[in-house]
Image (cartoon, grey):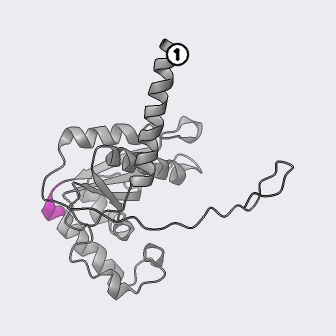
Amino acid sequence: MKIETAAAASRETAVGVADAIYGRRSVRAYAPEAVDRAEVRALLDAAVQAPTAVHEEPWAFAVVQDRDVLRRLSDKAKTLLREGGDPRHLPASRGAREFLLPENVFYDAGTLIVIYGKPLGPFVVADCWLAAENLMLAARGRGLGTCVIGLSVAALNTPEWKAELKVPAELIAYAPIIVGHPAGETPPTGRREPEVLAWKNGLAVPH
């Protein structure tokens, strides 16, 4: 009986994980309803369950739920882009002018969670992004929407914004993620089939 119950629980968990993975969207329209502190804490708790090289746990977090602060940070991000910001944070298929169309780069979401990395080793960036994925999937599971706002990375890493958010100078912002209650449905976007470069099992690469 216990074995059957455990197997059923395992199947339910697998279904939940699949829904989170395949149902996650980059949400860019949010309802005004706030994300409460308990929900934010739950997302942070999920984030730190991510894999981490040699158990360094190099991540740290800043949570911004002040709309005036978010507006000023958005303005700073746009200013840096106009002044020749890092092109890695721009989609290759879009120009800067088109990308700046949103009045607020955070799409009026009321919560921003920033994942910072501590200088602890060569896998800090990977660890922080693993934590980011955990956070976003956990948000999906709780009915919340998320979107990574790479455009804000440069602003977050300026001395003035580190000082405003009381972030130590040596930490680096890697993953700024907005969180909120979606306003309507976000349609899925297609993905290409996995590009398998090698599959060494003694057989031909499957098609």
Task: Tell which of 170 and 101 is nearer to you.
Answer: 101
Q: Position of residue 66 (x, y in %)?
A: 15, 57
- Kindly identify which residue carries mark 1: 3
Q: Residue at x 48, y 11 (%)?
A: 1
Q: In the image, is 111 to the left or to the right of 137?
A: left
Q: Nearer the viewer, residue 35 or 150?
A: 35
Most frequent secondary structure within the magenta stretch: helix
Q: Is residue 180 above or below residue 39?
A: below
Q: Secondary structure at mark 1?
A: helix
Instruction: Report the side of 203 relative to 33 (left or right).
Output: right
Q: Quadrant of the C terminus?
A: bottom right
Left or right of residue 64: residue 191: right
> Residue at 20% of width from left, 61% of height from top?
183
Q: Residue at left 47%, top 83%?
A: 93
Viewer-nearest residue: 29 or 106: 29
Q: Amino acid at mark 1?
A: Ile
Q: Position of residue 160 (x, y in %)?
A: 28, 65
Q: Residue furthest right?
A: 202
Decide whether residue 66 is among the magenta residues.
Answer: yes
Comparing 9 with 172, the one in front is 9
Is residue 71 a member of the stretch shown in magenta?
A: no
Specify start and end residues of the magenta stretch as a single range: 65-69
> Is residue 131 at all visible to an observer of this figure?
no
